[in-house]
Amino acid sequence: MNKLVLLTWLTLLLPTIVNSQPKPVFYVSPKGSDANAGTLNSPFASLEKALLAASGTTKPTDIILREGTYAVAKSLQIDRSDLTIKAYVNETPVISGGKTIQSRWEKVSANRWKTRVPMYFRQLFVNGKRATRARFPNAGMWSSQWFQPDTIQTKAKRLVLNKPFPARFANLKGVEMHATAWWHWLRQKVARFDPANRAVFTMTEPGPECSGRKMDLTDRIYFENHLEFLDTDNEWFLDSLSQTLYYQSSQSPAQLSFVYPFVETIFSIKGTEQKPLRNIRLEGITIAHTEWIMPGLERKGIQAGYWGTEKGKAVYAPPTALMMTWATDCEVTDCLFTRLGEGAIVLGDGCQRNRIQHNQFEDIGANVIQIGWRSGYVGEGHPLHYVPRNSAAVPSANVVHNNHLQTFATTDHGSVGILIGYAHHNKLTHNLLEDFPYTGISMGWRWDTLANQTYENLIEWNEVRNGMQYLSDGGGIYTAGQQRGSKISNNWVHDMGGGPGLSEGVYNDEGSSYFELSNNHVERVNDLFYKFHQNILSSVNAHDNNGQAGKNVMQVTRNPKVFLLQVVDSSPDHPEQYGLLK
């Protein structure tokens, strides 16, 4: 009898004993060794080794990173659930997709230096700051020194510019032309310069071929990537044939640190529809240095970070440092994303109930955070090609909360801060977005009022400021297409403008319909505070919005007349309620 009772008790207690065992914890330090045991006193040296060790157990597992930089040679694949990767208490580990230049520098002239490098790259960071690729002219956006087209001959691939350029440009090779085109940003290879006629010939048709909008006479142009342009401190040029890096500086490069990115994606979290990954957490780490790629001849922006080349060819979405598909109940918190060539985070197919919160994003090349794809806008054969399979593939119920997005769209100026594509029941709350060239928050696709998979999203209590600095026809908050059941409420948008065209506060573009727009504050914008364009106005519940009198005329070309939206002329009584929570 006693043996039976004892056996019964053991049977009942065994699951409790097993579950009470401490979860596996692996420590990593740049001072460690991958031959170690991965303990606090004997840590691994690489994150790759720690992930391999974590794959040997199904128990919830922690990987704890000590202070220092962890350089990765390729994307880190996370293929298991219940995994936390976090910083050791009060330490700041950095996961970098870059390489440090350690070769010896040689002085070429008074302030010019050179060194040999092993590979080609498009970005260079000096002492943690983005250096300027050699360009002409040097002046910043919208300076009178920039060029503008006087004549555009698209089929002849010829632009006549508004002022002359040096005769020596006739012999330059490998130059890239950078140009605005309203809401697009273009990069194209130059075939040749014709200084006598102030003309430049491009290798492909100038302008955004994948869009209905072409270049016009208001666009601005500069040229990049030639040793001839290297004339200002902190400029650089990489001669790809000789693998020689040139750097202009009055200070010796031996006293500086140089890092160039070469990895596109740092973390890939990729589950499947049958087996989604769950409960993965990144906490307190810095993710830095990702590369961006330009095809051989051109990279032409389309809208909100999507880009293409020739008309009829594939269209691409920007990759990100953290790419997630079929991931549920995951969290990214208290992290810093910085010095990225493309985007920071994408929540793709099957991503549900994930949280991105309390993070800082600065110097992000393309879209910072993207939720969902845009159907039909990623080309066949590309790794991001998207064909909706079922409703479960549409991202939903994700939260982006209390994040600081600053200085983004730094390489592709047509990108945005937060993009909601085809996705539903997502919440964007208490985020601060500032200092950017185009739109802050963009939601929806399609330019018609047909039902789609963008619905029941919430954009609330965000502060969006100092945007639309370069491009046109966007705003602090932008929507397109039907937004059934969505709500844009209690946001503060201010100081939008800088480009030559339309800079709106809240811009509800073609097809935006069936949503609520309420209690928003808009101040100091170049064009309209609230704009409706080609909409079903009667479907929008717009009320209690605030702005400045006389700046609220709406164009509603599907309605019989232009109307004035009724707003209260006021500023926020409690600005601390918007954007980041203290």
Image (cartoon, grey):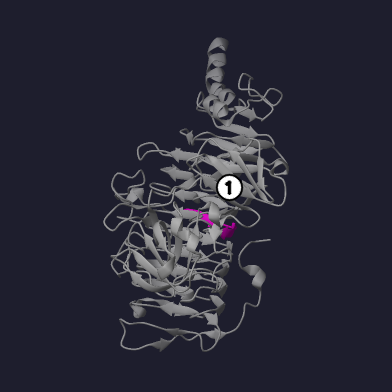
Q: 1 and 544: which one is in front?
A: 544
Q: Position of residue 581 (x, y in %)?
A: 65, 61
Residue behind mark 1 = 124
Lateral position of residue 455 relative to residue 433, left or right: left
Question: Residue at position x 35%, y 37% from top?
Answer: 274
Q: Is residue 15 visible?
A: yes
Q: Position of residue 315 (x, y in %)?
A: 33, 54
Q: Based on the picture, tell me whether residue 402 belongs to the magenta stretch.
A: yes
Lateral position of residue 58 relative to residue 466, left or right: left
Q: Amino acid at mark 1?
A: Leu
Write the start and end of the magenta stretch as one range.
397-407
Q: Is residue 423 visible?
A: no
Q: 515 and 13: which one is in front?
A: 515
Lateral position of residue 482 relative to residue 407, left or right: left
Whether residue 164 is situated above or below residue 256 in the rendered picture? below
Q: 330 and 127: which one is in front?
A: 127
In which quadrant will I find the N terminus?
A: top right
Whether residue 144 is situated above or below residue 375 in the rendered picture? below
Question: Residue at position x 57%, y 28% from top?
Answer: 50
Q: Based on the picture, tell me whether residue 87 belongs to the magenta stretch.
A: no
In which quadrant will I find the C terminus?
A: bottom right
